[in-house]
Amino acid sequence: MENVDTIIGINVNLKGNLKNKGSIQVNGSVEGEVRSDENVTVGETASIKGPVVAKVIEVSGLIKGIIEATEKLEINPTGKVFGDINVKSLIIKQGAIFVGKSTMADAGGEAAVSEKIEAEEAKESK
């Protein structure tokens, strides 16, 4: 992947939403939404509890939440994804874990995932 604008270090425990126009690399823990206009890389030591939205998402750690990748989602052998995904292209490598529903993106699919994220956020804030 190209240069990374934001890096969440291995010892960082972030609670809240992380949004960036550039690429994000997570090596620590994030509890909240991670959203990038570019790419999100989830390192082997990373843990994300919440939705992840980006063009390209590469998972080597853990994600518990909805994923929306407008171009590609790649789950590496050490990657674990627990949650529904909406993607244009999906690569799951041998050894990876994926538990959830997969939808291939189109104009209607993207809207459906965005609505689902908003509904989950509303439910959690009550």
Image (cartoon, rainbow, N blue to C red):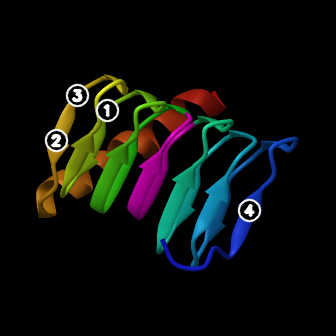
Task: Name the kind of residue labelled 4 in the image.
Answer: Ile
Q: Write down the region rendered in magenta.
A: 50-61
Is residue 54 inside the magenta stretch?
yes
The answer to whether mark 1 and mark 3 are in CB contact below 8 A is yes
According to the image, label 4 marks what residue? 7
Query: Toward which corner of the image does residue 102 lie, by quadrant?
Result: top left
Instruction: Specify which label sits upstream in the sequence, 4 or 2.
Output: 4
Between 15 and 88, the one lying in front of the other is: 88
Is residue 114 something that shows in the picture? no
The answer to whether mark 4 and mark 1 are in CB contact below 8 A is no
Query: Is 16 drawn above or below residue 5 in the view shown?
Result: above
The answer to whether mark 3 and mark 2 are in CB contact below 8 A is yes
Task: Name the kind of residue labelled 2 in the image.
Answer: Thr
Query: Toward which corner of the image does residue 88 lie, by quadrant?
Result: bottom left
Helix, strand or loop for disc 3: loop
x, y percent for residue 14:
80, 44
According to the image, label 2 marks what residue? 103
Query: Is 124 drawn above or below residue 103 in the view shown?
Result: above
Is residue 29 inside the magenta stretch?
no
Instruction: Specify which label sits upstream in the sequence, 1 or 2.
Output: 1
Residue at x-position 28% and y-position 59%: 72
Helix, strand or loop for disc 2: strand
According to the image, label 3 marks what residue? 101
Q: CA distance from mark 4 to mark 2?
A: 29 Å
Q: CA distance from mark 1 to mark 2?
A: 8 Å
Helix, strand or loop for disc 4: strand
